[in-house]
Image (tube, grey):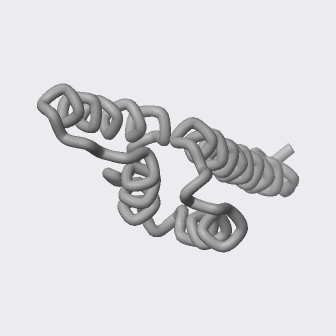
Amino acid sequence: MKQGESIDEYFSRTLAIVNKMRIHGEKIEDVAVVEKILRSMTPKFSYVVCSIEESKDLDELSIDELQSFLLVHEQRMTTSTCSTEEQALKASTHGESSTGR
């Protein structure tokens, strides 16, 4: 996964490659795709990857389920980042005005 790439973009790119390989006769099991996706995630997803590996049976986990888990995590990270930025902006506006009034 590339830095700054969204989960949807990454899955679209990966599944396009997998589909091309299957068209050309490669027999790729979904479990192999799931494992490769988990191994290629950026470090910011490392704890959710560990959680998925520990709590889910990867042989039974579908590609769609994996994408859903990772999307939820991505949305939480985005929401958390946005609320932190809003708090920082609010904190900076509570000071006294320096306009001399």
> Relative to the observer, which residue lies in front, 21 or 92?
21
> Relative to the observer, which residue lies in front, 58 or 70?
58
Drawn side of residue 34 relative to residue 91, left or right: left
Drawn side of residue 23 relative to residue 67, left or right: left
Query: Looking at the rendering, which quadrant does residue 22 occupy?
Result: top left
Residue at image location 32% in from the left, 39% down from the top: 14
Query: Looking at the rendering, which quadrant does residue 65 occupy?
Result: top right
Query: Looking at the rendering, which quadrant does residue 96 occupy?
Result: bottom right
The answer to whether 46 is drawn above or below residue 33 in the figure is: below
Residue 25 appears anywhere in the view: yes
> How many numbered callouts?
0
The answer to whether 72 is drawn above or below residue 95 in the figure is: above
> Relative to the observer, which residue lies in front, 28 or 80?
28
- Residue 92 pos. (x, y %): 76, 55
Residue at image location 69% in from the left, 44% down from the top: 72
- Residue 58 pos. (x, y %): 57, 60
